[in-house]
Image: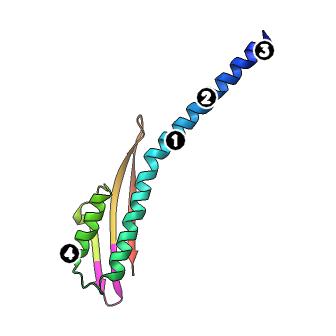
Amino acid sequence: MRRDTEHGMFRLKTILALLMLCVAGYICARVFPPYFANSQLKDKMYEEARFAEANDRTIEQLRDNIYNEAQRLEIPLRREQIKVEKSSIGTRISADYTVTVDLYYYQTDWGFHTTSER
């Protein structure tokens, strides 16, 4: 009889471990995409700022390019939130936005401040 109890405990521990692994996987699947999208947006901002003078882009063209990239990445960013400053030393692009992460029973807002200077 003792052997059956040990076997049952092994099953319970295995089920709990698999449940915890599934929960951790779910949380990672909900948390990782906003960070990855922000990284992609930052790369695009850096690229646009770096080549703004060489490509002879206006402030509105730069803002439109960043906005289009944000839409492609499904980032909740409005055109007005994108700030572009051109000066003699280079171009600076920045954006502030908030993403709501839904973890089924819990929702949280994460603020991102993305800046790219050349």
- The local secondary structure at tag 1 comes to helix
- The residue lying toward the viewer, choosing from 86 and 74, is 74
The residue under label 1 is which amino acid type?
Gly
Disc on the earlier residue, 2 or 1: 2
Residues in magenta?
Answer: 85-93
Which residue bears the numbered disc 3?
A: 3
Q: Considering only order in the chain, which callout, 3 or 2, is on the residue closer to the N terminus?
A: 3
- How far apart are the alpha carbons under marks 2 and 1? 14 Å
On the image, the x and y values in percent for residue 96 come to 34, 63
In the picture provided, is 18 more to the left or to the right than 74?
right
Residue labelled with disc 4: 60
Q: Within the image, what quadrant is residue 78 found in?
A: bottom left
Please tell me in which quadrant of the rendered image residue 88 appears: bottom left
Residue nearest the viewer, comparing 3 with 34: 3
Residue situated furthest right in the rendering: 2
Q: The disc labelled 2 sits on which kind of residue?
A: Leu
With 6 as the anchor, is 64 left or right in this view? Answer: left
User: Marks 3 and 1: in contact by CB < 8 Å?
Assistant: no
- Whichever of callouts 3 and 4 sits on the residue coming sooner in the sequence is 3
Of the numbered discs 4 and 1, the one sitting upstream in the chain is 1
Asked if 21 appears above or below 28 in the picture, the reply is above
Tell me which residue sits at (36%, 65%) in the image: 41
Q: Amino acid at mark 4?
A: Glu
Instruction: Give the labeled residue for mark 1.
Output: 25
Mark whose residue sits in front, 4 or 2: 2
| Mark 2 and mark 3: Cα distance apart in space | 20 Å
* Distance CA(mark 1)–CA(mark 3): 33 Å
